[in-house]
Amino acid sequence: MFEAEFHRTVRAVLAVTGQSELLQNNHVLANSIKLRNPYVDPMHLIQVDMLRRKRAGEDTTEVNRAIAATISAFPPG
């Protein structure tokens, strides 16, 4: 369901902007995102796992710190 909505949204954005691909007219941002994704994708997976654990009842300081770190991309100080 989410994937289908994502694809519908992409098609709508492309139709409105008249582009054939996202960020077609902003190569600097497109390249920045391509370089960034290999680093942040694993962090997103950790975030999903930590949120799942918290919702399952594991509401510990460690889990909360890990969630905060994945949100800010830095460990809490």
Image (tube, grey):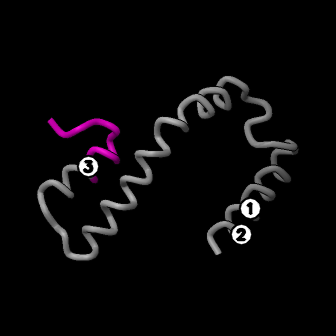
How busy is the neighbourhood of tag 2: few (under 14 within 10 Å), some, or many (20 plus)? few
How busy is the neighbourhood of tag 1: few (under 14 within 10 Å), some, or many (20 plus)? few
Q: Which residues are magenta?
A: 67-77
Location of the C terminus by quadrant is top left
Residue drawn 45% across and 45% down?
42
**Per the image, is 28 magenta?**
no
**CB under 8 Å between callouts 1 and 2?**
yes
How far across and how far down the image is residue 70, in percent?
33, 46
**Residue type for callout 3:** Ala
Give residue 68's mark. Answer: 3
The residue closer to the viewer here, 28 or 47, is 47
Which residue is identified by label 2?
4
Local secondary structure at mark 1: helix
**Per the image, is 76 magenta?**
yes
Which residue is identified by label 1?
7
The image shows residue 16, relative to residue 73, as above or below, that is below
- Looking at this view, name the residue that lies furthest to the top: 28
Q: Quadrant of residue 47?
A: bottom left
**Does residue 31 appear left or right of residue 53 in this picture?**
right
Residue drawn 53% across and 32% down?
36
- Looking at this view, name the residue that lies furthest to the left: 61
The residue closer to the viewer here, 4 or 18, is 4
Local secondary structure at mark 3: helix
Residue drawn 66% across and 27% down?
31
